[in-house]
Every structure is written in structure tokens, then in C-alpha cells.
């Protein structure tokens, strides 16, 4: 049998082709889907927290998360040139924000695992994900436009 020479092989990379990771449609769609699910999960978590009147995480864990994020945020802001008081406020806001997001995400996952999505209804959840995807793309494009026109 004769060896047939074929240019390239199955593992060669075509320099003219675009990677799926570089495709702007795929990147935007992936970010929108991720953010949509993320926002709806947070909403379901808040729904669960307000309906059960209890936190999905123990208070000690929430306090530990706040403390670690507070310290990391404070050091980050101090290293970026803020004065001590501003870095303390920035660290506190970062700690509160991250704790809030994490508690609501855990609450949303617990709510979904307990079958709460069927109580709310799949139609409402899918509609909420779709609306959140649209809102997240609009927010990202507005943020990108704002940062693009701002000089640092």
C-alpha cells in the first residue's frame, strides 16, 4: 500500500479558522446563559429565604465568609491606593456583597434540590432565565460601552 501525503493531519490547526472560544456569538451566549441562570438561582434563593425565614447557611459560616472577604477587599483597596477609611468601607461592602450573593446562591440550589422549581413552575423559571439573559447582555454591553469611553 502506498503512503498518500495529505497536507496537515487531524490534529493540525488551521491558522485561518476561528476557535470556538474566540467566536463573539459563542462568548456572548455563554456569558448570557451563565448570568441568566446565576440571577435566577439568586432569586430562587431569596424566595426560599423569605418563605422559610431562615438562612441556608449557618450564621458562623456566613460570618466567616464575610470576614475573609472583608479582609481581602480591604487589602485589595489599600494596595490600589485608597486611604485606610475608604479601604475599610470598600472591604465591608465587598464582604457584605459576597456574603449576600453566596447565601442566596446556596438557598437557590437548596430550593431547586428540594423540588421547589416544580412548585414555582418550570414555565416561570425558564421565562425568568430568558429575561435575565436579555438583561445581562444589555448590562454587559452598556458597561462595555461606558468603560470603552472612559479614559484611565
Image: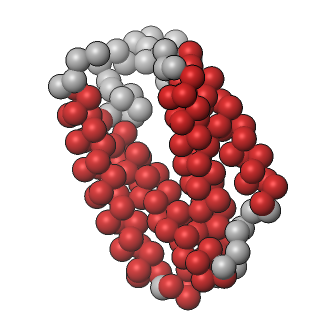
The residue located at (36%, 29%) in the rendering is 22
Instruction: State the residue lying farthest toward the bottom.
Output: 119
Residue located 57% across and 54% down the image: 101
Residue closest to the far left: 149
Task: Residue 5: tell me if it is visible.
Answer: yes
x and y, in percent, of residue 66 in the image? 68, 45
Position of residue 3 measured from the top left corner of the image (x, y, whole percent): 52, 12
At 50% from the left edge and 28% from the top edge, which residue is drawn?
Answer: 86
| Residue that appears at 43% across and 52% down | 35
Q: Is residue 139 left or right of residue 47?
A: left
The answer to whether 151 appears left or right of 118 in the picture is: left
Q: Position of residue 52 (x, y in %)?
A: 66, 82
Colour scheme in use = secondary structure
Question: Residue 9: in sight, yes or no?
Answer: no
Q: Is residue 96 left or right of residue 20?
A: right
Tag count? 0
Q: Is residue 120 above or below residue 17?
A: below
Instruction: Answer with the quarter of the image where residue 127 lies.
Output: bottom left
Q: Where residue 9 sits: x, y (%)?
A: 48, 18
Which quarter of the figure is the N terminus placed in? top right
**Location of the C terminus (image quadrant):** top left
Q: Nearer the viewer, residue 68 or 148?
A: 68
Foreground residue, 11 or 99?
99
Q: Locate residue 135 relative to residue 11 in the image: left or right.
A: left
In this view, 37 is above or below 49: above
Amino acid at each position: 500500500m502506498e503512503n498518500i501525503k495529505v497536507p496537515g493531519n487531524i490534529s493540525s490547526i488551521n491558522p485561518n479558522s476561528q476557535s470556538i472560544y474566540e467566536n463573539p456569538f459563542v462568548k456572548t451566549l455563554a456569558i448570557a446563559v451563565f448570568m441568566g441562570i446565576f440571577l435566577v438561582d439568586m432569586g430562587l434563593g431569596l424566595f426560599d429565604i423569605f418563605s422559610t425565614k431562615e438562612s441556608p447557611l449557618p450564621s458562623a459560616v456566613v460570618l466567616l465568609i464575610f470576614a475573609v472577604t472583608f479582609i481581602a477587599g480591604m487589602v485589595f483597596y489599600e494596595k490600589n491606593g485608597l486611604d485606610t477609611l475608604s479601604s475599610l468601607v470598600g472591604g465591608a461592602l465587598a464582604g457584605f456583597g459576597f456574603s449576600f450573593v453566596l447565601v442566596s446562591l446556596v438557598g437557590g440550589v437548596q430550593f431547586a434540590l428540594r423540588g421547589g422549581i416544580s412548585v414555582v413552575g418550570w414555565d416561570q423559571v425558564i421565562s425568568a432565565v430568558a429575561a435575565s439573559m436579555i438583561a445581562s447582555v444589555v448590562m454587559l454591553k452598556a458597561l462595555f460601552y461606558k468603560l470603552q469611553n472612559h479614559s484611565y
